[in-house]
Image (spheres, grey):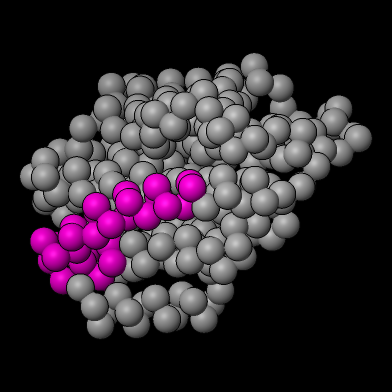
């Protein structure tokens, strides 16, 4: 029996509710929009997992695990994902593997007049994650953020009917801040995939070597490096902070909670004295409850 659009939306919502990381997804937006927000999340989450999951940790001796995928295999999986998406947009038959995502996404795009390019930007970033493991300058990292994170914020605004460029710009600041906070939070995790988002120019500036990173050595130089990255990330969050004041009540709560979630991660990194090699800061259930209250009480 063919999958229905309703069933596809239900699967997207189930994924969104079980797989979010630093903050809830679509919990505070109007009920009628939640399925569409969850569909956007599922599209991004599944593609990201194709690029991200199952790497052999270069810090371990066993690096030739037969269950890990090669770069070419990962790129092929994402290429298949992209082709199925393109076929769905063109009204052609695609494989059934991801129809539970693409049918709701097509419905969402059509109902809310969403630009497909934002979805292609996301796919471009995920493909880049596979073949690019180092970034020479901060501007290169920021360019990645414009495709890996910013499209999500813009899509959420568009789903709510906000098309003003100024609001999209504020959203970009918050989304870039979130992505950067995740990078500094996950330095150790990303090393397990042989990825370093810390700009090479900054590694040199603070006299931190890749060998020290892979050794898990949180030297004073490393902590200074993370402090520098956290400070520049605060700038993005502060620039995007006014966004919630211009939105409807429920979306304002959602964006406010997202902002609070990202900045709380930065505060936790600061509390660790910038040692994210020794310990990964994360939000607890108590943190989430507190952020929810704060999002309601402040705007």
In the rendered image, the quadrant that contains the C terminus is: bottom left
Q: Main secondary structure of the magenta part?
A: helix
Residue 140 is inside the magenta segment: no
Residue 119 appears in which quarter of the rendering? top left
Instruction: Indicate left or right for 147 with 137 as reference.
Output: left
Q: Residue at x 34, y 62 (%)?
A: 259
Instruction: Indicate left or right for 112 with 156 as reference.
Output: left
Instruction: Indicate left or right for 138 with 294 as reference.
Output: right
Q: Residue at x 72, y 40 (%)?
A: 213
Judged from this view, the residue extending furthest toward the top is: 72
Q: Position of residue 25 (x, y in %)?
A: 39, 60
Please tell me whether residue 154 is drawn above or below residue 196 in the rendered image. Answer: below
Q: Position of residue 98 (x, y in %)?
A: 48, 36
Residue 196 appears in which quarter of the rendering? top right
Please tell me whether residue 14 is drawn above or below residue 157 in the rendered image. Answer: below
- The span shown in magenta is 228-256
Residue 109 appears in which quarter of the rendering? top left
Front in this rendered view, residue 283 or 93? 283
């Amino acid at each position: 029996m063919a999958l229905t659009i309703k069933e596809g939306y239900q699967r997207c919502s189930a994924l969104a509710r079980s797989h979010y990381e630093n903050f809830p997804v679509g919990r505070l937006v109007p009920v009628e929009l939640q399925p569409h927000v969850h569909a956007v999340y599922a599209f991004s989450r599944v593609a990201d997992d194709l690029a991200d999951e199952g790497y052999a940790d270069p810090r371990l001796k066993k690096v030739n695990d037969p269950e890990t995928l090669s770069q070419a295999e990962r790129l092929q999986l994402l290429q298949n994902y992209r082709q199925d998406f393109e076929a769905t947009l063109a009204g052609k038959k695609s494989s059934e593997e991801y129809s539970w995502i693409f049918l709701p996404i097509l419905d969402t795009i059509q109902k809310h007049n969403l630009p497909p390019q934002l979805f292609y930007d996301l796919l471009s970033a995920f493909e880049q994650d596979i073949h690019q493991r180092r970034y020479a300058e901060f501007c290169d990292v920021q360019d990645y953020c414009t495709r890996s994170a910013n499209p999500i914020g813009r899509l959420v605004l568009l789903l709510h009917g906000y098309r003003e460029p100024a609001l999209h710009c504020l959203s970009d600041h918050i989304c870039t801040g979130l992505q950067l906070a995740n990078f500094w939070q996950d330095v150790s995790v990303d090393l397990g995939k042989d990825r370093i988002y810390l700009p090479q120019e900054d590694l040199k500036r603070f006299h931190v070597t890749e060998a020290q990173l892979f050794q898990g050595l949180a030297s004073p130089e490393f902590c200074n490096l993370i402090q520098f990255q956290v400070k520049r990330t605060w700038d993005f969050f502060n620039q995007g902070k006014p966004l919630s004041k211009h939105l409807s009540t429920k979306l304002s709560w959602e964006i406010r909670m997202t902002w609070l979630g990202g900045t709380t991660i930065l505060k936790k990194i600061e509390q660790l004295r910038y040692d994210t090699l020794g310990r990964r800061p994360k939000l607890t259930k108590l943190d989430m409850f507190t952020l929810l209250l704060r999002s309601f009480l402040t705007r």
